[in-house]
Amino acid sequence: MTELLGLRCSGALQHNRTSALTERLGIPLLAESATPAGLFLDLGPKGLALLDGRPGAPGAVRADFLEPALLRRMQQVGARSEQLVRAVGATKGRRPTVVDATAGLGGDSLILAWAGCAVTLVERSPIVVALLTDALERVRHTAPDNPAAELRLVEADARDWLAGLAETDRPDVVYLDPMYPERGAAAAARKEMQRLKQLLGSDEDAAPELLRVARAAARQRVVIKRPRKAPLLAGSKPSHQISGRSTRFDVYMCHPGTETNPA
């Protein structure tokens, strides 16, 4: 896990937000002209972003629930055509409650929200939580009718949070997209995820335990997103799979027969 070097505020200084962020994350406030040689946060007109000041580093990483290309896809094609939506069992007549236990930047949660699911994002990193909080504030302020405005965010280790749920709070579906070290050509193709992995480290060691806790917490199914040719997580055989060109979704039915119209 890589240290975060500080927070830079570009443009007009937002005193309340910057002081709250620096205090909460335990990082210094950088001068507006500073570009440290490493990872830092930048609060500017487009919102909060994670940057790398080293020469040759890729651009900003931010959570964005108003990303134009994804919104066009949702509006023109519809969320129900997405393999993820099929994997969680969402249909016009069934809108499951979903916990995205490895929220990351929230892209998959946004798709599920557009499909009508009630989604809770659980994220363990305070830095990623800060990025998500900023994105949620922007969408609620500028586009309150966007389904992303209804997303719920929880900062926690998903293993502990899921294990501590009361019976009445258990979700229909737990969705997992663990962060693994990527090798070969794939590693160079996803620079945004590389940046998060650099900051957060890998979920590889924790993933089997997370799957076990997720299967105990979900009422209906657990869905795991995997590279299409990757081995099964912990060797555990899913009930079925939904595969695309580069990605597949392994679906573990928790209580077969509890759904009236299984996907």
Image (cartoon, rainbow, N blue to C red):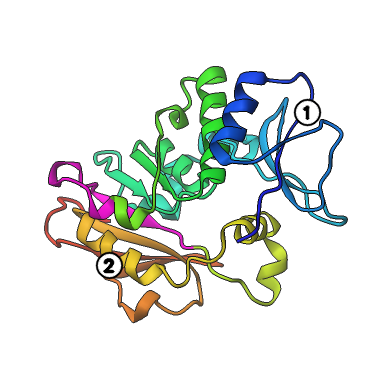
The magenta segment: 162-178
Q: Is residue 147 visible?
A: yes
The stretch drawn in magenta includes residue 65: no
Q: Residue at x 43, y 36 (%)?
A: 114
Residue underneath mark 2: 212
Decide if residue 221 is on the left or right side of residue 140.
left
The residue that appears at 57% across and 33% down in the rendered structure is 23
Circle 1: element type: loop
Q: Amino acid at mark 1?
A: Ser
Label 2 vs 1, first from the N-terminus: 1
Left or right of residue 157, residue 77 in this image = right
Q: Which corner quadrant of the image does residue 113 belong to?
A: top left
How far apart are the alpha carbons under marks 2 and 1? 44 Å
Label 2, secondary structure: give it: helix
How many dots with numbers? 2
Q: Based on the picture, tell me whether residue 170 belongs to the magenta stretch.
A: yes
Q: Amino acid at mark 2?
A: Arg
